[in-house]
Structure formats: C-alpha cells, structure tokens
Image (cartoon, rainbow, N blue to C red):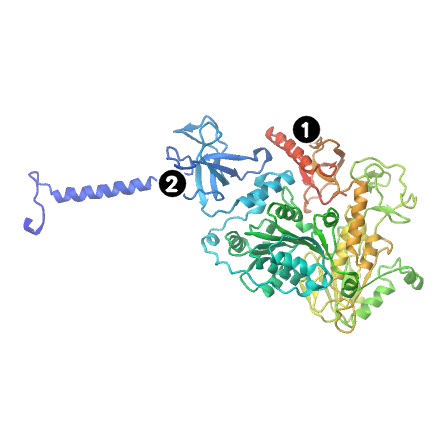
Amino acid sequence: MSSDNGRPERDPAGRDPGADLQGSEQLALIRETVRKAKVPKAKPRTWRGAALARELPVAKVLVDKGPVHLDKLWDYAVPAEMDAEARPGVRVRVRFGAGTGKVREGRREGGGLLDGYIVERVAESDFRGPLAAVAQVVSPEPVLGPGLLALCRAVADRYAGSLADVLQLALPKRNVRAEREPSPPPLPPPGVPAPGSWERYPAGPGFLDALAGGGTPRAVWTALPGPHWPREWAVAVAATLASGRGALVVVPDGRTAARVDAALTEVLGAGRHVLLTADLGPEERYRRWLAVSRGSVRAVVGTRAAMFAPVRDLGLVGIWDDGDHSHSDIHAPYPHARDVLLLRAVHERTGFLLGDLGRTVEAAQLVENGWARPLEADRETVRAAAPLIRTVDEGETARDAQARAARLPTLAWQTVREGLTRGPVLVQVPRRGYVPRLACERCREPARCAHCSGPLEAPDAGTLHCAWCGRPEAAWHCRECGGVRLRASVVGARRTAEELGRAFPDVPVRTSGRDHILATVPGRPALVVATPGAEPVAEGGYAAALLLDGWALLGRPDLRAGEEALRRWLDAAALVRGHGEAAGGGGGTVVVLAEPTQRPVQALVRWDPAGYAARELAERAQLGFPPVSRMAAVAGPAEAVTELIAAAPLPEGTETLGPVPLPLTEPGRPRRPGQPPPGEEWHRALLRVRPGQGSALAAAVKAAKAQRLARGEKDPAVRIDPLDIG
C-alpha cells in the first residue's frame, strides 16, 4: 500500500513509525490499567500513605468488642476515598490492638480486623499519636442513628453492661440482598379510628384522643378478659399514626404477636406496619427492620428484640404482659423490655401503654408514684366479662369430705362434664420442673429468713438456711400462726391427659406444651390439656377450665411466686366465656384447685389483679424487696465474687446478702443466665440498695468489672434487678 493511501513511510532503519505509535498507545493503556489496579476500593490492611479526607478527617468509632473496660469511642483516620461513604451510623471495619511501635508513613499498623460503627466525624483527635485508618466501609447504610445510640448507651448504664453488648441486641445482622432492595414509599397517616371496645373503659376514649392529638399519655391498662385486647392494641396504634407519629408494641411471644399483627392488618390495612419476630429469618427480618429505619413504616409489633426498633417520630411505646419472663433478654447485659421502653418513653418523650390481663408489682409502682395512670374498667363491666371462678371452699368440703385431698374433687368432675356439653374444656397443668418451696404446714405461709426475709431452704433433712444470705435458721417459727412444722408444696402429676382420657373415653384430648404448642382449637367439645403459657385460643371461648395443682405454682421458690401464679391463672381464665358475652347458652366456669384463703386465689375469684399488686407492693416496701429496692446479683467462683464486691465503690448503705453456693448445673440440661457451667461450683451474692441508688449501684459494679478485666482476671456474672432471686 502506498503512502498516498495513508500508510506512513519507514524510517532509514526500516522501522515502521505506525508500529511505534501503536506500541506507545498500547503501553499507555497498559500503564493506565495497572495504575487503576493498584488503587483498590479498600485497603483493609493499613491505607498506608493514602490522603485523608479534607474535612472532618477523624472518625470516632464504636468498636464491636464487648468487655466493659473497652467501652469507649476510638479515633480513626478517614481516607479521602471513603469520605462520601464514611458517614455517622454506618458499619465499618477497623484495625484494633495495634502497638504504638508499628507506625509506617504516618499510619499505625497491626492488630486484628473488627466490626464497628462510625458515631461521629470530627476535625481533630484528642489522641496526639498516629492514628490507624478506617479499613473499610462495610455498607453505606446508616443503621446507628443518634436516637438509637443514646438509647443503647442508657441501657448499658442501667444494666452495668457495655455499649457493644447492647448494640448486638439492638442491631440485626446485615444482609446484602435485603439492603440492596429499596423500601416502599411511606403511606399517608390514616384517619382517626373509632374507639370501639375501648369505650368499655371510662378513660379509654380520652387516652385515644390524646394519642390522636399528638399528646403523650402514660397508662397502665388492665385489660378485660376476652378476645378484644388485640384489636384494642391496633386501635391505639392507629390513633398514634393518625397524629403523624410512629408506634411500637412489644409482646412476649410469636403467638401473641400474630394475634396483634392480624388485628393491625384489619384496622390499618396492608403496608402500614411490620411484624418483627425471630421466626422471620435473618433476611426478611433485616428487610423489615430497614423499612422501619428508612421511615417507610411507622408502626412495629414484635417480640423482645423489637424494643430497639428505630421507629421514626415515635409517639407511643407499649408492652403487653410485662410479667412474662420472655421479656427479659438472655444475653448480657440482660435488659428487660419494660425498662427499655420506659427509657424510650422518657428520652424520646412518647406516650406509654403497659397492658396486661393482670398487673405486675412494677406496673403497680408506676401507678403508685404517679408516673402513669390506671386504665381499667368498672367492677360491673369486669363481672360481665369474666367467667365464674369457683374454689374448693368449706361448703364444698362439707359436701365432699375428700375434696381438699383429691387432685380432681367432685366439683372439678362436674364442671368438666357440664362444660363438655357446650364446648371445649381447658385443663391447665403446671409443667415439670416447678420446685416447691418451704411453707408453714398449718397456714402455708412461706418460710422466710428472720434476718433478710429471704426464702428458707433445706438441702438435707437436718439443716435449714436462707437462700439469700446463707444464715442458718435453727429455731424457725411461723410469723402468722406460730407453727413450727414445715411442708413442701405438691407437684403436678405427669399423666393428666391420660387420666382424663380414661375418664372421658368418647371425648378427644389435645395437649399443648413446650414441645408442641397449639395456637387455636375448634369450638367443638374436647379436653385441652396445656401447661402455663401454652394455652391455645378456642373458637368462641372455652366452656370451662380447670386450674390444677395450684400449689405447684404458689409453692415455687421465688419472690414472685404468688404474682406469677395469678398471672398464669388470669391468662387461662380469660380464654373462658364471660357471663355477659357468653355464647352457646351460658357463661363459663373456672375451677382453681388451690388453698382458697391464699391471696392470689382470692384475687382471682374477685378478678382484682390491681388490688393484689397494690398490696404486694406495700408488703415489699416494708420488707425492702424489689422493685422498691434495687438489687444486683453477682455470681461466679467464690473468690471472684468476694473480690469484685470488695473492689466496687458501692453506695453508702449497700446491704450484701451472701455469698451462698448455687446448685450445680447438671450436664446436658439448659443453662439459664446466672447459673454455673456444668461441673463448676459457683456462689452468688445479692447487693441491695435503697430507692434512688440503683444508678450508683450499677455504676459501681461496672467500674469493678472494668478493673478486673483490665487486669485479665476472671469476671463474675453480674445481673442488675434479676428476675429470679428466690
């Protein structure tokens, strides 16, 4: 081809100039490709020599590392390439544990990669030495907002824990696929709902009006028995959404969450709320959590972990059945959903609603000190909604001489037989594992220590000592009747279903318990045997119910035994048809087989949980029991427990009860919080302080834990306000 056609002439050496030009272009292209390849998107090792962000080049990072002695923010340099994504609230990866001698080109190197969260960007660091750089921005999604961070910090201080431990409870694990999906746009606020069944409560419509008007009412709601309370929760949430604010409701289990979720869908329609439970799976749960965090959804109902849900413009926080142990987290620092929601109500200035068929002593304290107002129906309405409660009283004993001793007296058989003609009959049987405590043989008053009022126990036939302070009790006598003989409460039988099946061979028998829990049962005649907390809902309500072996509940070795027994009985009895709302030709009947003179039994007969809780609170105030006093339980090897208590700057007047040895944990059995690992011998001490000193107690115990961990010493388990103290 000639030069006229555009081909350059060869030089004297015979080389083609076009080849040089083409080679130089290829070389430039290769150099550009290599240059780009040498600048990765992230340098997870050091970012050595990288330029820093021009503005706010220092990030204060909360490292996801649990020990309390590392509970602080750490400064890291922000490379310029991360400037746009390294915003407050995002997840990052940082090097932690680098030595001061490992510094190259102005960057500290070494240490292991840990997860963390950027809390703040600042212009300068208080640390004057070289900083390590943020290794990587894991995700640009801001998941830790200022409100959630402040809440987690308050919870950590309340329970003597670390902020990192609380964040592990508050923030779900990241799911890339769910994070890449956009959340739907938010829907406009709904209209103000009609009060509906809230009109049965004199203060109910006013409470809803306050929520709809943007107010922050605070109430302790004693719900009427029957099927209406899930819809009443939905109406309260709808009233809050009508004001343009968000709402959060925490319930104890998935079955309860499903009932409230169905009521919310019926009242609000689809797309205005989300359900957050562990059954969803990590991807779907994170997808819904993101919808809440991004403001797409303003209403949340869920189980325990939902107490940290980042609802925008929160206007109402609520909790149902706060006495259920499921509300207390099993991971450190063991926060209780009720206390977390109380903190949210105060810090975020929201309304508060604590609902229950009964009333816990903590709820009674909120009413007693005026922080919340009672929201309850009048006595006539309560009597119409509740079933008839019967006990084996003196009249029944006169007619049936063996009624007190028999597990199923004549009254129980007659109630079951008559109830089966009209529908299903519920039989509540205490589950295995209820351990009886000691009580007076004559009047059955619980046996307590003369020094600290703790429960007495007898590990063998010849000794009697306190389970709290460990003092021996050589000459015990009952404070009520003067009796000197002790007895242990009865324990429920194991074959209740088989016994009833033989007695009623033509009636189907269904069971609901830990291994298999039924949600609902048909309204046809059947015997439904359930353990406490596993009672299914019957279509149209149960015709009758038997509450067996009441002493197995009342005799538990726990301060809350009476309160817990009444709560369990109310939950079961509320599923029985009421007098005024009866279906199928008459109201329902409940027979409780327990000593009729006991206060929890009398409270059930009158359906007066508020009165029982108020009296229980007054007695605990006299004896210095929680929640009037505040407590911390310290459990671990005896030497570690003693050393931690000695090192803690405890508030003046702190009373130390114990240490006392804890029962050994059998291999293969589940280990509850505060129990020793199998094969280890632990002791437990209780620290009790006066009202108003709870924060100082938590701070003192946390400081002592931090000192021990900094020295590499074994840290005992610490739990603030434990549920089980004996």
The picture places residue 373, in percent across and down from the top left corner, at: 71, 52
- The disc, 1 or 2, on the residue closer to the chain's N-terminal end is 2
Q: Residue at x 79, y 44 (%)?
A: 620
> Distance of mark 1 from mark 2, alpha carbons?
47 Å
Q: Are marks 1 and 2 in contact (CB under 8 Å)?
A: no
The answer to whether residue 401 is above or below residue 216 is below
Mark 2 surroundings: few (<14), some (14-19) or many (≥20) residues within 10 A: some
Give me the residue at 53% from left, 40% from top.
64
Look at label 2 and name its amino acid: Glu
Residue 549 at x, y percent in the picture: 81, 56
* Residue 658 appears left or right of 14: right
Residue identifier under label 1: 647
Task: Give left or right: position of 588 versus 718.
Answer: right
Nearest to the observer: residue 540 or residue 606: 606
Q: Is residue 516 something one can see in this rendering?
A: no
Bin the neighbour count of mark 1 within 10 Å (Cα to Cα): few under 14, some 14-19, many 20 and up.
some
Label ID, residue 81: 2
- Which of the 4 quarters of the picture holds residue 20? top left
